[in-house]
Every structure is written in structure tokens, then in C-alpha cells.
Amino acid sequence: MILTGFFCFLVVFMMYVDSVNAMTNRSTILLKEESSDMYSITIPITQKSQITQQDVHSYGIKGFLVKQAIKIIKIATDKGGDVLNYILKWLDKDTAKYFENNKDKVVKSLDDLENWVDDASDLAQITIKNKLNSLLMVAGVPGTYSLPIADAIARTITWLVL
């Protein structure tokens, strides 16, 4: 968890440094008058920077963190561990059993959710829960199970991001 926090801080810091460097470019302009005296004036020049990295998307840092959390949850769904335990603690016994027996449907829905995050502007927990619930139902998870599973995973995403 500490490593994840450090990674997130590093990403934010690198983005900040790049944006500051792109926005603050000062250039000296020399003006010459008829009397042949030279004057030096420093004028700030704003340049439009071009983003050349292909993995930068419009979802920003919060969306990036949500996508990383989804990837962690997909791995945990298969491998187990603390993240999976965090998800399962929100589920009743019957839903947890269904989750364990239908991991492939959950992972497919998480793949779809990860693709959806690219275009999402509002990444609140309730939005993720509602979207994942609909994706789980499309994947064939009955509504009895899809809503608690979506809620547990949305809570886990929030827990991982914060």
C-alpha cells in the first residue's frame, strides 16, 4: 500500500513538473532604437505544449488511479489476498459463494469497467457501482448478486485510491 501511495505521488509530481516547464518559458527580446542604444526586456512567452506520450488520456490522475485499482482487483479476484478479503467482507455468505464460483463473469465486467473509465468524467463511488452493476447483469450475473458485488468492488476501488 505504501508503494502504491509513493507511485501515485511520483506520477502526480512528474505531471506537475512537466506542466510547469511547458507553461513558463521566458525569452529575452532586444529592442533597438534609432539612437543605437540597446534595451533588454524580458517578456514571458506562453507556448502551446504538445503531449506526445500515447498513454496519456483525458481521464486525468483520478481515472488513472481508478484503472490501477481495477487492475489490482482483477488480480486479487484470481490470486486472493487482502484486496479480495476486503471485497468479500461486504458480501453475505450466499453472494460470496456466488462470487467465488463466477469469477470469470466478474473479471469480464471489470475489463468492461476499465474500458469505460477512459470516457468517464465522474468517477464517484456511486457511479462506479451503478456502471459495474449494469455490466455484471449484462455478463449474466443475476440482480440478486450483481448489486452487492458491484457495491463491494466500488468500495474497494475507493479504498485503494484513497
Image (cartoon, rainbow, N blue to C red):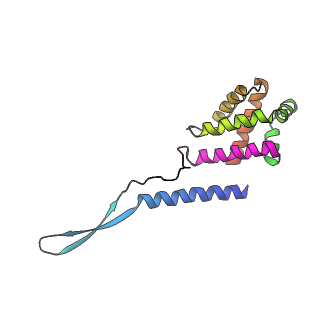
Q: Is residue 112 above or below residue 142?
A: below
**Residue that appears at 57% across and 56% down:** 12
Query: In the shown orientation, is residue 75 left or right of residue 48?
Result: right
Q: Is residue 134 above or below residue 31?
A: above
Instruction: Name the image quarter holding residue 121.
Output: top right
Query: In the shown orientation, is residue 35 left or right of residue 106?
Result: left
**Residue that appears at 73% across and 33% down:** 150
Part of the protein shown in magenta: 55-79
Q: Is residue 138 above or below residue 42?
A: above
Q: Is residue 121 above or below residue 139?
A: below
Q: Was residue 7 drawn as part of the magenta stretch in this picture?
A: no
Residue 143: horizontal and vertical position, in percent?
75, 24
**Which secondary structure dominates the residues rendered in magenta?**
helix
Q: Was residue 67 drawn as part of the magenta stretch in this picture?
A: yes
Residue 83: horizontal and vertical position, in percent?
78, 46
Q: Nearer the viewer, residue 101 or 146?
A: 101
Query: In the shown orientation, is residue 27 left or right of residue 21?
Result: left
**Residue 162 shows up from this direction:** no
**Residue 160 shows up from this direction:** yes
Instruction: Name the image quarter holding residue 124.
Output: top right
**Residue that appears at 43% across and 58% down:** 22
What quarter of the picture does the N terminus occupy?
bottom right
| Residue lying farthest to the left in this orientation | 34
